[in-house]
Image (cartoon, rainbow, N blue to C red):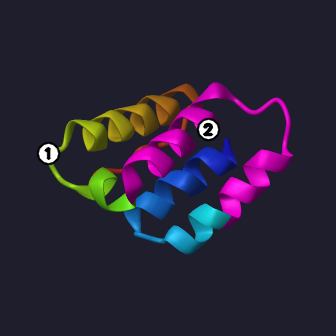
Amino acid sequence: MALFYCLYFCIYYNNPDIVEFLKILVDKLENLPEKIDELLKSIVQNGITRLRMIGDPLSQHVYHMVFYQAIDDELRIVYS
């Protein structure tokens, strides 16, 4: 799931260069979790800029996807 979080932080920090690198890496790997493909497809179809927009339904979908994945992975969530 490290690739999943890397993709999320590429959105968060607006880094399309790393997204391109991760897209190439994901294409070479097999048996990836469906959430990684879903997040990458969302980035490719909509672009990082739209996914970063506050209030956009796609942005909220990505945030909730990452939030629930963090809970599933039993990560400690720190609120600021």
Q: Quadrant of the N terminus?
A: top right
Question: How many neighbours does mark 1 have within 10 angstroms: few (below 14), some (14-19), or many (20 or more)?
Answer: few
At horizontal 82% and vertical 29% (from top left) the residue drawn is 31
**Who comes first in sequence, dot 2 or dot 1?**
2
Image side of residue 26 versus residue 73, left or right: right
* As drawn, 70 above or below 2: above
- Residue at image location 42% in from the left, 32% down from the top: 65
Residue 12 x %, y %? 39, 61
Q: Quadrant of residue 50?
A: bottom left
Q: Which label is found at residue 36?
A: 2
**Measured along the vertical axis of the image, is residue 48 above or below residue 56?**
below
Residue depicted at x 46% and y 49%: 43
Label 2 residue SS: helix
Q: Position of residue 66 (x, y in %)?
A: 45, 39
Q: For residue 28: magenta?
A: yes
Kindly identify the amino acid type of the residue bearing the numbered disc 2: Ile
Is residue 36 highlighted in magenta? yes
Q: Position of residue 48 (x, y in %)?
A: 39, 59
Q: Amino acid at mark 1?
A: Gly
- In the image, 69 versus 42, the foreground residue is 42
Q: Alpha carbon of mark 2 to alpha carbon of mark 1: how far?
A: 23 Å
Count of all numbered marks drawn on residues in the image: 2
Residue 68 figure quarter: top left
Q: Residue 15: give x, y in percent of width and height.
A: 48, 71
Q: Which residues are magenta?
A: 21-47
Q: Which residue carries the number 1 mark? A: 55
Horizontal arrangement in the rendering, residue 61 relative to residue 34 (left or right): left
- Describe the element under mark 1 as helix, strand or loop: loop
Q: Quadrant of the C terminus?
A: bottom left
